[in-house]
Image: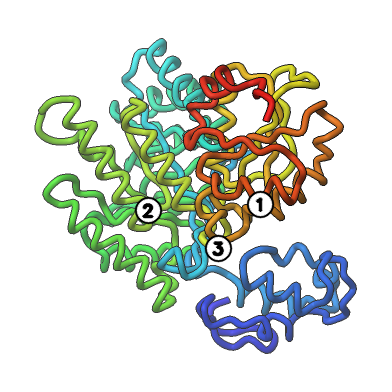
Amino acid sequence: MTGETTGTVQKKKSIREISPIDVYKLLPRTNCQECRESNCMAFATRLVNGELTIHNCPPIFADEYAAARSDLEFLLAPPVRAVTFGTGAHTCTIGGKYVLQRHEFTYHNPTAVAIDVDDLMPEEDLQERVRKIAEFTYHYIGRTLSLNAVAIRSVSGDPKVFAATVRTVAGATGLPLILCTTNPVVMEAGLAEAKDRRPLMYAATEKNWKSMADLALAYHAPLVVHAGGDPALLRSLVKTLKACGITDMVLDPGTLAENGLSETIHTFTAIRASACRDLDELFGYPLLGVPLAVWIGEEISMDVLKWRETITASMLMSRYADLLIMHSLDGWVLLPQLIWRFSLYTDPRKPVSVEAGIRTFGNPGRNSPVLITTNYALTFFTVESDIKTAGLDCYLIVVDTGGLSVESAVAGRYFSAESIVKALKETDATQLVDHKTLVIPGLAARLSGETEEASGWRILVGPKDSSGLSQYLRERWPPKPA
């Protein structure tokens, strides 16, 4: 639906223009609470905020609400279409963006990172590289960061060689595949080997678009549209392919490394701004960046090339790339991208937090230490790591501070004598140990006196940095009599 709808919605709105009333008018308005909200208006508010989806409202899928549902889906559709490739547990969804700036709403569907292989690699090296791609993970404040796809490049130009490589990679990993060639004959050979995996086709160009469109329709595969350095041509190709019936497209405006990087960033920004601010449907598709491009050019130091790839990838991710194709597997190249992606795609309206409660480490006894901290994820996982590294046997009470760190929570009175007393009662800490001594963070030292008075517990001020817990407890536990 582009300009005509079946009901009350006549014109596509930006997410910033949609109010809960717009959504409420299209809901059943029965207040049935099947969505687990108190009423339909509450559901509409959370729907607009991106906290729930239309699927959380079962009644609207009844036939009697078909027209309203169609209007609602159109109203809530993001300016940047979501495109999915891959199958099963490894399905990868990119795009689905509502806003240009993260603080306006939030970003959905984190940028996917794919690593390349080529069809001239010896099979043993190919298998080993695919294994490393699949196994590359990093644990960061309670989340597992990993790579998302394998991009298979046709270097040989031989359909049989490419098909054999696709077959080998598909058999070695369940990760989504990106088939990279502009030769339709080679592409078809690869698609035949991965037809059940819904690979992403790279790429349709000014010269091959008709053949690539036919293959995309025949194999029900999403298609990358490439027009390096020419946004007008890119837009024209999208319009033509859309008229051919292609719905799932990814845009590759071209990635120029080093001297052309500023132009690349400008092009990516202009395309995304056109989609989100001007609601340009022809630019409303995910963007593909290729940091791999830094490897095509002058032969210089490998470390310099890796550094350039790192810079290019992080800048493209910051400027709206929904998918990156990279080459290096070095940790110092990839980890900055994965950690930056994690930060970029957290909801700015909600601090990253963990569940409040009590945690047990090691084999604590009746005289083991009781520690306390806030539920800010970075704080908690840092403390957890230091406790585990030191091999401490202890209890750790986690206070709900709304996801704020110790210092911020103390300043805002979220971590206070009252909240500590409440946590001690809720966790029933007195049933775990025979003493009533609590170690609070050094950054919360000013709470010690009032907490002692309010709780009846003896309060010890621990180190400001949890890395000092091991030495602190070794020297001061069990505590001397007051």
| Residue 424 in sight from this viewpoint | yes
Name the element at disc 3.
loop
Q: Which residue is drawn at 43% across and 72% down?
A: 276
Q: The C terminus lies in which quarter of the figure?
A: top right
Label 2 element class: loop
Q: Mark 1 points at which residue?
A: 450
Q: How crowded is mark 3: few (under 14 residues within 10 Å), some or many (20 or more)?
A: few
* Residue at 18% from the left image edge and 56% from the top image edge: 262
Q: Which residue does the image show at 39% across and 67% down from the upper left? A: 283
Front one among 7 and 479? 479
Q: Which amino acid does label 1 sit on?
A: Glu
In the image, is 120 to the left or to the right of 90?
left
* Crowd around label 2: few <14 · some 14–19 · many ≥20 (10 Å): many
Q: Is mark 1 on a helix, strand or loop?
A: helix
Q: Check disc 3 and give the amino acid type.
A: Arg
Label drawn at residue 321 = 2
Whole-angstrom CA distance, mark 2 to mark 1, is 51 Å
Instruction: Kindly indicate whether the residue at mark 3 contacts the one at mark 1 (C-beta within 8 angstroms).
Output: no
Instruction: Indicate the position of residue 285 as horizontal and vertical percent values.
Output: 44, 61
Against 203, residue 149 (above or below) is above
| Side of 325 where 391 appears, left or right | right
Q: Quadrant of residue 282?
A: bottom left
Residue identifier under label 3: 349
